[in-house]
Image (tube, helix red, strand yellow):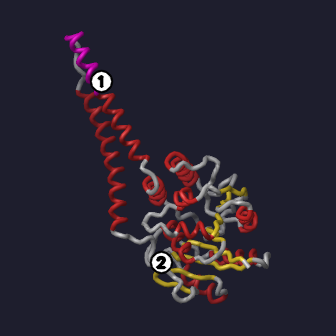
Amino acid sequence: MKLLSFVIPCYGSENTIEQVTTEIAAKVAERPEFDYEIVCVNDCSPDAVWSVLMHLHERNPKIKLLNLSKNMNRPGAVMAGLNHASGDIVIVMDDDGQCPMAGLWDLLAPLSNGFDVSMAKYPERKQSLFKDFGTWVNKKMTQIVLKRPPELEFTNFMAMKKYIVRELIRYPHPYPYLTGLLLRTTKYMTNVKMEERARFNGRSTFTFLKMVSLWLNGLTAFSILPLRLATYTGLLIAGGGLLFGLWMIIRKLLFPDTISPGYTSIMVALSVFSGLIMLLLGLMGEYIGRIYICLNHSPQFLVRDSVGFEPGSAKDE
C-alpha cells in the first residue's frame, strides 16, 4: 500500500480547511491501494485555524499538525511540511479549496509514467488581475533567469515522488524557492490540465510585499544572471559615455562656436545614471544581505508545536 502525504500550508483558513481535509479523505477512499496522511502547517495564522486543526486531528488522527512560531509565508510553511511528510508521493496544495481534488488521480498518473513531478495546469485562473500580473511576471522571470521551459506551469497543486522531496529538504538556507529547487532537481516534470475552482470562502492573502519577496527569491536564490546583466549594463553605459565624450571633443574641434549642452540636459543625464547606479547597488546589496543571513544560519521555519507525529520524527528547523 502506497502512502500519500498531503502538505497544506494554512493561513486564514479557519472556514475552509475542514472542507478541504474532508474532500481528501473521501477521494483517497476511492482507491484502497492508497493510504494517506495530511500535514497541515499553521503559518502563525491570525485566526482560529489552529483550534480548528486540533479538532480535526481529534476526529481523524491521519491529520497531523505543525504550528510555526512565526509567519514564514507559503515557501517556508511548505518546506516545514515537506520535512515532516513520510509518504511515497507528496502532494502540495492550498487550504482555500481552489485545488480541484476531483483531478487527484489524473495528477498522480504521470508519476507512474516516467515523470518525477506532476502539476496542475489551469487554462483559466480563478484569481484577481493583480495576482494574474504577479504570476505572469514570475513566469517570465523564471524563464529568463532559471531557464524554465516556457510550456511548463508551476501552480498551487502538485505531486512529487519521495526522492524528489528528499532532495528538496536538503536545501538548508532561508528564502526557499520551490520553483527553483524543482528546476535544479529534475527535468522530468509535466502538467495536467484541469479546472481551477473558486475558493470556498474569503479572499487571497497574496499581498504586494509577498509578490515582491517571491520575485526576489527567484532572482537571487539560484542564479547570478542579474549580476551579469548589471555588469553588461555598466559596460554598455561606460561605452556609450566614452563615445559621447569623444563626439563632444570632435564637435568642439570642428565647430568651436557650438554651444555646449545646457544645465537641463546635464541634470537629466545625472539623474538617470545616478538612479541606475543606485538600482544596481541595491541588487548587489540584496545578494550580499542574503549571503550574510545564510551565513548566520537563519532557519527556514521553526516548529512551536507538532501533533500526530511519531516521537523523534519531527524536525524543528
Residue 243, placed above or below residue 92:
above
Q: What percent of the width, then of the height, locates residue 64? A: 59, 82
| Closest to the observer, 198 or 83 | 83
State the extent of the magenta-drawn residues as a range: 242-257
Residue ID for mark 1: 244
Upstream in the sequence, badge 2 or badge 1? 2
Residue 126 position, x and y percent, is 65, 57
Q: Residue at x 29, y 24 (%)?
A: 244
- Amino acid residing under circle 2: Leu
* Residue 243 painted magenta: yes
Given residues 182 and 212, the one toward you in this image is: 182
Quarter of the picture holding the N terminus: bottom right
The image quarter containing residue 16 is bottom right
Q: Residues within 10 Å of mark 1 (few under 14, many from 20)?
A: few
Front-most of 202 and 134? 134
Looking at the rendered structure, which numbered label has been put on residue 68?
Answer: 2
At 52% from the left and 82% from the top, the residue drawn is 314
Relative to 246, say whether 30 is above or below.
below
Marks 2 and 1 sit apart, C-alpha to C-alpha, by 57 Å
